[in-house]
């Protein structure tokens, strides 16, 4: 059952299902100079697939490889295949019936791979008498472009089957990551909070979907915001993936679908493919994204009471020409702004009270609010009208700053903060008071989900991070990001979310707590 790649032509590949994914997988095989048989029951779909594959081969300078493509509507043509990759619609019964038919048709040594993204490989393999030769081979869309392939080992998959598919993936010039057969595998599972928390924030009235996308792109350096990406994927497809994971995990709250997506599907606003989703296509004039101004030398002094929730903040302010004081021994008269960056567990309340007593009433106070709400902070001070919450975790090196007005913030203070940040070359984006703000909430939940996956032995931490970078183009692996932020800070944000919402959705992975303790021991 182990494939031997003597030459690229020594292994016969069949792809079943000639839709978007199937034709993309077939094209990937041809681009690797390997022959492929492409099967579908629809002559229309096969004709479109031929045009797609041959046109892309021409663009890539491999037009001659069209001779290695065989199109068929006869399942019997698959009988001599070594690896049969099914890419039919996400329907368990359909996939099971297809594999059962293949088992009757194909040689006993043939390997069956399913491209399912949400269904259990073990359940699909249950349809055949030889489940040891069935594994998941999950390509990402567009298959010829995306470098990742998840290889999924079902409950009865033989190790030789996995090794053969890893070898095939390498021959295709792609990166294989092996994972256990659990709902969502790696990428679809770990990515859930990217969409789920964005939808929750929209539903909670934190801010608009345009601003959430802007903060995620400009602050987190993601290529697309969650709402843009849902529109691209298809809101119905994204909802189906979430619903499938929620059902398979017997109602795990981290995967609970959101009413907003249900309503979008009900009105057929599915994204780009219907011309309307969270945005309209084509020709919509989206919210004009502010571009960071060039850094101006502002002059004056900032008083920083430091903490881990705003790393490198002093460097950001220095680049704008501000002098930095880090204690209460400076004259308060020339202070433009006071900033508190500790976590509540590190003494944020003490810092805020000290700043409020020390600074004249007209001087703004910026308070990190990744793990506390600004309304809570406002109860500590005599002058809440000058209080502004900010996201310190994702300010350094960012072109955007997420800000939250205190409950009695004056227009003058807000204006002075806008001017200060603009002078630093940073776009101010104001949102309503909310636990975890925007980026801390999304990224800490992504990290938590990734760590849960490691704890449940879906894959090793390095493989999880690699899958997320290659499969969905994340700027950093979620676990590496958590380590960079500090496990204590991630845990602080999650515990804050849990305490505010009282939902199991926000419980921290026990492995994260263990890593945080080890972090403290080794410090």
Image (cartoon, grey):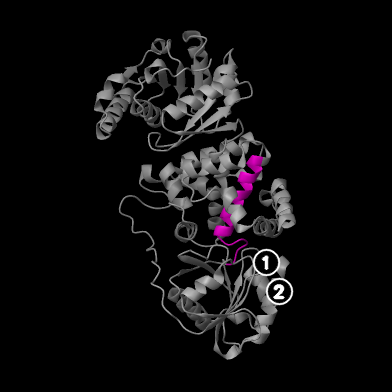
Residue at 54% x, 62% y is 394
**Under tag 2, what secondary structure?**
helix
Instruction: Looking at the picture, tell me which residue is in the foreground, 239 or 384.
Output: 384
Residue 455 included in the magenta stretch of the image: no
Instruction: Give the magenta range.
Output: 433-454
**Under tag 1, what secondary structure?**
loop
Quick check: can you spot residue 404? Answer: no
Q: Which x, y percent locates residue 211?
A: 46, 61
- From the image, tell me which residue sits under label 1: 343
Q: Is residue 479 left or right of residue 57?
A: right
Between discs 2 and 1, the one toward the N terminus: 1
- Circle 1 packing at 10 Å, graded few (<14), some (14-19), many (20+), is many
- From the image, tell me which residue sits under label 2: 349
| Residue 383 placement: quadrant | bottom right
Q: Which x, y percent locates residue 8?
A: 38, 20
Instruction: Looking at the picture, tell me which residue is in the foreground, 354 or 21.
Output: 354
Quadrant (top left/top right/bottom left/bottom right) for the C terminus: bottom right
Q: Which x, y percent locates residue 342?
A: 66, 69
């Amino acid at each position: 059952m182990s494939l031997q790649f003597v030459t690229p032509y020594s292994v016969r590949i069949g792809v079943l299902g000639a839709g978007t994914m199937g034709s993309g997988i077939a094209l990937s095989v041809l681009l690797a100079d390997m022959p492929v048989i492409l099967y579908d029951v629809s002559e229309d779909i096969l004709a479109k697939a031929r045009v797609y594959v041959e046109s892309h081969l021409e663009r890539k300078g491999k037009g001659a490889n069209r001779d290695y493509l065989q199109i068929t509507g006869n399942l019997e043509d698959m009988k001599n295949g070594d690896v049969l990759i099914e890419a039919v619609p996400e329907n368990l019964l359909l996939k099971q019936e297809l594999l059962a038919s293949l088992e009757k048709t194909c040689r006993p040594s043939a390997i069956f791979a399913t491209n399912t993204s949400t269904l259990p490989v073990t359940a699909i393999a249950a349809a055949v008498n030889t489940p040891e030769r069935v594994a998941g081979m999950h390509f990402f869309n567009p298959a010829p472009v995306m470098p990742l392939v998840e290889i999924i080992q079902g409950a009865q998959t033989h190790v030789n089957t996995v090794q053969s598919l890893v070898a095939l993936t390498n021959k295709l010039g792609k990166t294989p990551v092996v994972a256990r057969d659990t709902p969502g595998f790696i990428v679809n599972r770990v990515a859930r909070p990217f969409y789920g928390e964005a939808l929750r924030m929209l539903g909670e009235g934190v801010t608009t979907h345009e601003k959430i996308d802007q903060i995620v792109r400009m602050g987190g350096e993601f290529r697309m915001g969650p709402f843009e990406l849902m529109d691209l994927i298809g809101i119905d497809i994204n909802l189906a993936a979430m619903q499938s994971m929620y059902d398979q995990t017997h109602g795990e709250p981290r995967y609970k679908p959101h009413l907003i997506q249900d309503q979008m599907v009900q009105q057929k606003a599915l994204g780009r493919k219907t011309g309307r989703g969270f945005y309209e296509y084509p020709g919509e004039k989206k919210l004009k994204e502010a571009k960071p101004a060039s850094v101006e030398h502002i002059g004056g002094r900032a008083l920083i009471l430091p903490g881990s929730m705003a790393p490198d903040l002093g460097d950001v302010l220095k680049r704008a020409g501000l002098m930095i004081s880090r204690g209460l021994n400076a004259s308060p008269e020339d202070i433009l702004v006071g900033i508190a960056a500790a976590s509540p567990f590190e003494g944020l309340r003490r810092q805020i009270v000290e700043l409020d007593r020390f600074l004249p009433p007209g001087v703004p106070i910026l308070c990190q609010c990744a793990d506390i709400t600004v309304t809570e902070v406002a109860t500590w001070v005599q002058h809440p009208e000058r209080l502004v919450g900010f996201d310190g975790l994702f300010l350094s090196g960012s072109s955007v700053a997420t800000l939250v007005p205190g409950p009695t913030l004056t227009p003058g203070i807000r204006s002075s903060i806008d001017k200060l940040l603009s002078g630093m070359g940073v776009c101010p984006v104001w949102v309503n008071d909310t636990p975890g703000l925007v980026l801390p909430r999304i990224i800490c939940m992504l990290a938590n989900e990734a760590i849960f996956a490691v704890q449940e032995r879906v894959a090793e931490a390095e493989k999880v991070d690699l899958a997320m970078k290659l499969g969905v183009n994340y700027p950093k692996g979620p676990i590496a990001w958590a380590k960079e932020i500090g496990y204590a800070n991630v845990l602080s944000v999650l515990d804050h979310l849990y305490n505010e919402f009282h939902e199991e959705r926000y419980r921290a992975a026990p492995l994260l707590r263990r890593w945080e303790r080890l972090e403290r021991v080794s410090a």
